[in-house]
Image: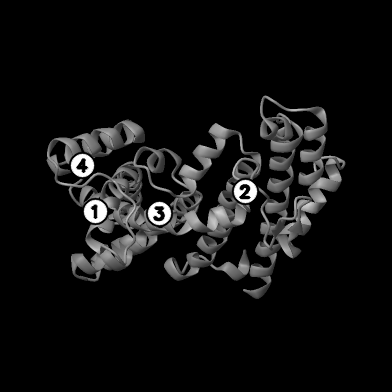
Amino acid sequence: MTRYVVHRLWGMLVVLFLVSLFTYIIFFALSPDPAVQICGKNCTPERIDQIRANLGLTEPFLTQYLHFLQGLFTGRDYGNGVHCPAPCLGYSFQTSQVVTDMIMQRLPVTAVVAVGAAVLWLLAGVIGGLVSAVREGKFTDRFIAGLTLAGMSIPNYVLALALQYVFVVWLQWLPFPQAVPFADDPVRWFLNFILPWTVLAIGYASSYTRLTRANVIDTLGENFVRTAKAKGLPPALVWRRHALRPALTPIVTIAGMDFAGLLGGALITETVFGINGVGKLAADSITKNDQPVIMAVTLLAAFFVVVGNMVVDLLYSAIDPRVRVGTS
């Protein structure tokens, strides 16, 4: 087990290194000169050179990348007197802020969005898929299949705008989205997240319902399930212990990856609802062409996906006894 974990950690570091290298090449070597953008229209060549020197852009590309890697572990000092503590993900060209601080301010909000949506889509997806499998071929199965098809077909931004109009503008059941700290007004805080959670959960739940249904139906055809039924075990016990648990293995895989990816920011949903999370930060940075922030969000998303993948692999043995991590 320990050997497997060490092996996966080493692989994770290699993947993150390659992601950081490629993103650095894309955003810094192939993008427009950020010094020109910062300087503005009324600018002189001397001022542009000064900005490049302050940001460390006058050094060779490899040196710049090595300084970036060094900043992740030991921090970094910029020529304008700004100190970026470790892990330093860069210095924003547009807001003159340390990127790590910008992300840490937004990450708790994104985590709330991700956790709430994940709870909803897992409950709806697993329960809906299980009910659909139990009622295979009947009206309930066809009705759930229609709902999942609709949920997978509607784009997030269309669903977000439609729900916002219906529940906020028309029916006025929910307040207009407004940033309210949980300690100040827990009820208003909760109401602000209902629609974002719902929008994200609908699309994911549709996929999970179809996957759960297919896995449960396949598992019911296995010999060990037939044996459990032949022994006279109660149907509820057969479904819960012998059919559902093996069927959940691929569900956990996808759930871990989806949740990890969502921690990198739900760009469209956060933008539509005005949620100041990592996704909205990425969208604003793309509009402003703030390269360090875009790169930092990309690395953050890659980190969560790689870590989520490793955690899912370790959970396999707890969910399905047929899987043995130590022999992988």
Residue at 54% from the left image edge and 32% from the top image edge: 287
Kind of residue at badge 1 = Leu
Judging by the rendered image, the residue that carries numbered circle 2 is 296
Residue 41 to residue 115: above or below: above
Question: Is 202 in front, or is 175?
Answer: 175
Q: Secondary structure at mark 2?
A: helix
Query: What residue is shown with label 4?
Result: 144
The crowding category of the residue bearing disc 2, from other C-alpha atoms within 10 Å (few below 14, some 14 to 19, many at least 20), is many
Q: Nearer the viewer, mark 2 or mark 4?
A: 2
Residue at point 75% right, 55% down?
Answer: 81
Q: Amino acid at mark 3?
A: Ala
Lower sequence index among marks 2 and 4: 4
Q: Residue at x 26, y 62 (%)?
A: 185
- Where residue 294 appears, as percent x and y from the top left, is 60, 42
Type of amino acid at the residue the image marks with label 4: Ile
Residue 191 is marked as 1
State the residue in front, 183 or 66.
183
Is residue 136 shown above or below 229? above
Do the residues bearing badges 3 and 4 touch, measured as CB atoms within 8 Å? no
**Label 3 environment density (alpha carbons within 10 Å; few <14, some 14–19, many ≥20):** many
Q: Earlier in the sequence, mark 3 or mark 4?
A: 3
Judge by depth and name the residue closer to the eye, 213 or 291: 291
Residue 95 rendering spot, x and y as whole percentages:
59, 44
Q: CA distance from mark 1 to mark 3?
A: 16 Å
Position above or below: 287 against 116: above
Query: In this rendering, does residue 155 appear at all?
Result: no
Mark 4 nearby-residue class (10 Å; few <14, some 14–19, many ≥20): some
Q: Mark 2 vs mark 1: which is more N-terminal?
A: 1
> As drawn, is 276 to the left or to the right of 48?
left
